[in-house]
């Protein structure tokens, strides 16, 4: 299937590894020109590796998406390099786990900056250009927790739910301009973040990370955790011409973990 992404410009946040890297690879494999950002200087080499692997033009910029000035600078740099941004993938690392009383007011503030403000600021920066060209795709990487809260992740459960409300409302506002807004909900997927959660879970329960993985796999009807490329495939489709009538949705890639009907 030709997804119609050849030549489109995609900007993927937090793409040095994990889900962001997988999404950037998937878009590049479809012929999109890809810009990536992350906090570490190694992001420029990540961009070069993606470009070499898929034969497309890429661009890397160092930026912390929780810092508004970094977001503005990164979007300006990508726009100056490619001329436009057609596809925005908002993404950021998750806030720390723990029960409510373990998190200070400052921890809540940081979680909002990282997982809500970053989405709002990135969207604000790219939206005028998308509206002018009357075409755009905004994809927000959130979590299955927005449909079925995960115990011990009160920061993520709360802040990512706010992103869902933002995206659902924005989708209606920008639909007349040919812009779609969708949320991608990763389930338990084999990433560094999941390794960290397994470690925290093991410490809290006095078990092992392997036991945490085994417990998660028992909850998943498919009997295993997901792989980043399986999640990235959804992102590539929703960014495509083929998905032009799909908007305001929150789509899970979770092996059946969510038990709700919708």
Image (cartoon, rainbow, N blue to C red):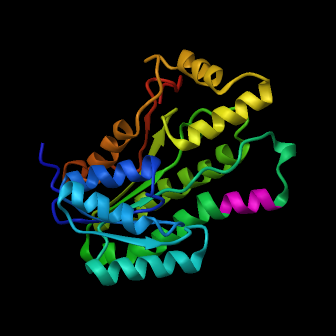
Q: Residue at x 43, y 73 (%)?
A: 61
- Report the span colored magenta: 106-112
Q: Residue furthest right?
A: 101
Q: Position of residue 208 (x, y in %)?
A: 69, 24
User: Does residue 182 sit above or below 147 in this rendering?
Assistant: below
- Measuring from the top left, give residue 245's x and y in whole percent: 26, 50
Q: Residue pushed farthest left?
A: 2
> Residue at the spot x=41%, y=50% of the render?
248
Vertically, is 103 above or below 177? above
Q: Is residue 111 magenta?
A: yes
Residue at 45 percent across and 77 percent down: it is 74
Q: Is residue 92 above or below residue 202?
A: below
Whether residue 157 is in magenta: the answer is no
Front-most of residues 168 and 24: 24
Q: Is residue 195 visible?
A: yes
State left or right for residue 49 relative to residue 124: left
Q: Tally the numbered discs.
A: 0
Q: Is residue 5 visible?
A: no
Q: Point out residue 150 in the picture as x, y percentages from the top left corner.
A: 65, 33
Q: Position of residue 203 (x, y in %)?
A: 77, 31
Q: Is residue 37 left or right of residue 120?
A: left
- Quick one: 78 or 116, which is closer to the camera? 78
The secondary structure that dominates the magenta segment is helix
69, above or below 248, in the image: below
In the rendered image, the quadrant that contains the N terminus is top left
């Amino acid at each position: 299937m030709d997804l119609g992404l050849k030549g489109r410009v995609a900007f993927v946040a937090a793409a040095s590894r994990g889900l962001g890297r997988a999404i950037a690879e998937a878009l590049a494999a479809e012929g999109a020109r890809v810009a990536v950002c992350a906090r570490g200087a190694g992001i420029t080499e990540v961009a070069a590796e993606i470009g070499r692997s898929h034969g497309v033009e890429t661009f890397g910029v160092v930026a912390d998406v929780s810092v508004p000035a970094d977001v503005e600078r990164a979007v300006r740099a990508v726009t100056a390099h490619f001329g436009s941004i057609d596809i925005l993938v908002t993404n950021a690392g998750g806030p720390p786990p723990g029960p409510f009383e373990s998190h200070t007011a400052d921890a809540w503030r940081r979680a909002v900056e990282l997982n809500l403000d970053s989405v709002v600021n990135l969207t604000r920066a790219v939206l005028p250009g998308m509206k002018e060209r009357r075409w755009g795709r905004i994809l927000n990487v959130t979590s299955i927790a927005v449909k079925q809260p995960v115990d011990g992740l009160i920061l993520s459960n709360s802040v990512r739910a706010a992103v869902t409300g933002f995206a659902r409302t924005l989708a209606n506002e920008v639909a007349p301009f040919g812009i779609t807004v969708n949320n991608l909900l990763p389930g338990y997927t084999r990433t560094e973040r999941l390794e960290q959660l397994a470690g925290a879970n093991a410490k809290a329960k006095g078990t092992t990370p392997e036991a945490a993985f085994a417990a998660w796999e028992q909850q998943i009807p498919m009997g295993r955790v997901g792989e980043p490329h399986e999640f990235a495939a959804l992102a590539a489709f929703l960014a495509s011409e083929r998905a032009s009538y799909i908007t305001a949705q929150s789509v899970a890639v979770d092996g059946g973990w969510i038990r709700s009907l919708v």
